[in-house]
Amino acid sequence: ASGACAAGWNHIGVRCYKYFENRKPFTDAKESCISEGAMLAKVDTQEVNDAVSEFVRNISVTSEFWIGLTRANDQNEWRWIDDTSSSIVWSKWEVDEPNT
């Protein structure tokens, strides 16, 4: 069916999402996604932020999760790991985020 996701994944908007319960450092979380043929979530709109946050809150005690945002090679610029955007336009961060 159109828009269907594999077992264990949740369809939100035009993408499929999966929450991994085991806490991992960013790099390990990114590698877990790659091993599933996926990537960390790209939360670049309020709609996606709200939907992914609600999805995680419904299945987890914590609402913390990694997203696919990382520093560029010079460490001064944040970039999405899919490299589709050279600038980050999202501005609804929690206090002191992004920070890693």
Image: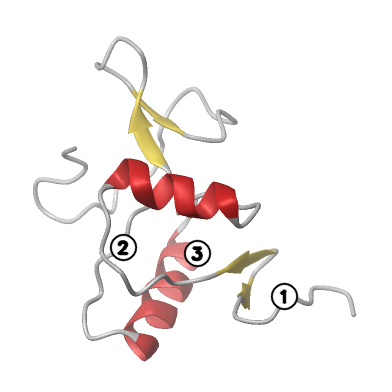
Name of the residue lying farthest toward the right: 1
User: Which residue lies at the image location 60% right of the left edge and 31% below the top edge?
Assistant: 84
Q: Determine the secondary structure under disc 3.
A: helix
In the rendered view, does 2 fall on the left or right side of 70?
right
**Earlier residue among tags 1 and 2:** 1
Mark 1 falls on what kind of element? loop
Residue at the image position 43 percent from the left and 62 percent from the top: 46
The residue under label 2 is 65
Residue visible at 10% across and 52% down in the picture: 95
Is 43 left or right of 60, judged from the image as shown?
Answer: right
> SS class of the residue under badge 2?
loop
Q: Distance between the Cα atoms at labels 1 and 2?
A: 20 Å
User: Disc 2 residue type?
Assistant: Phe
Q: Is residue 44 visible?
A: no
Q: Which mark is residue 48?
A: 3
The amino acid beneath tag 1 is: Ala
Give whichever of discs 1 and 3 has the lower sequence position. 1
Q: Label 3 sits on what residue type?
A: Val
